[in-house]
Amino acid sequence: MVNNLNIINVNQKIVIIANWKCNPSTEREAENLLREIKKGIKKIRNTEVIIVPPFVYLPVVRDKILLKSKEGIWKVGAQNCFWENSGAFTGEISPLMLKELGVEYVILGHSERRIYFGETDEVIAKKLKVILENKLSPILCIGETKEGREEKKIEKVLKRQLKEILSPISRFSLPTSDLVIAYEPIWAIGTGDFCSPDEAKKALLFIKKELIEILPRYLSQNIRIIYGGSVDSENAKNYINIGFKGLLIGGASLIPQEFIKIVNSCNLQ
Ligand code: 13P
């Protein structure tokens, strides 16, 4: 029997993820944005920076910018993928295609996918399966709505999401790629109303406890749990200080000076 302890890719570096969402509007702007960001980020030690552009900019991000990087700290991610590798599924992009493009990480279950495109935990679990089969690394987003902000409800939502999405994976194959879980309270996304470090820490500890129950211990301990939701250069390092292993950043990742400050402040922790 294969010893999973030997094949899991343990990665405990701080990870800062730039989720550009549906921005910018042109390839030239995308190139300029990344060039500006790269100029300001030097001498990174224990930090990885994952750029997650819209699908159409993946080749340019990979070819023109990331492959020229000597540091090895830069990675490319995708914002979504389909649950099959190929077939008659008009408009979809498969994990196999992403892998071929040099993508290493895939955001999964983002609240904007759940809200605007009706993605359920069941759909997300199907996508997780095929992402892991392709040895890509998922960045699984979980978090409660504004209505669910009360502590007991937060735990109920997180428990349900983790269980329904992660439990099936032990039934087919355990991951050998990196696993990242992003705690993104929905009310904090794009609102400026970030989650206080005290509240975020409660969620972090709860997620850790749940992971131990759902997954084999060696696996649960190696999952990086990160925070997302109105992160900026003022509040970023607070989340790293309380034990999050990274940040998932939307708006601030489109402002080079702001994103550079975030990465540099976390790198100094
Ligand atoms: P903001 O950083 O704009 O709040 O977005 C967070 C997010 O959704 C990252 O995936």
Image (spheres, rainbow, N blue to C red):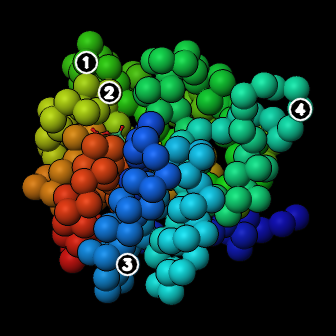
Q: Tag 3 or tag 1, which sits nearer the N-term? A: 3
Q: Amino acid at mark 4?
A: Gly
Q: How far apart are the alpha carbons under marks 1 and 3?
A: 34 Å
First along the sequence among labels 3 and 2 = 3
Secondary element at tag 3: loop
Residue 240: percent from the left, percent from the top? 25, 61
164 and 108: which is toward the camera: 108
Q: Which residue is mark 2?
A: 186
Q: Earlier in the sequence, mark 2 or mark 1?
A: 1
User: Of the residues shown, which amino acid type is indicated by label 3?
Assistant: Asn
On screen, residue 18 above or below 251: below
Check disc 2 and give the amino acid type: Ile
Number of other residues with Cα within 10 Å of mark 3, as a class: few under 14, some 14 to 19, many 20 or more = some
Label 3 belongs to which residue? 46
Q: Quadrant of the N terminus?
A: bottom right
Q: Position of residue 18 (x, y in %)?
A: 39, 53
Task: Please give left or right for residue 239 compared with residue 245 in the image.
Answer: left
SS at circle 2 = helix
| Earlier sequence position, callout 4 versus callout 2 | 4
Q: Is residue 176 above or below residue 21?
A: below
The residue nearer to you, when weighing 211 against 238, is 238
- Spatial CA distance of label 4 from label 1 is 38 Å
Nearest to N terminus: mark 4 or mark 1:
4
Give the CA distance from mark 4 to mark 3: 40 Å
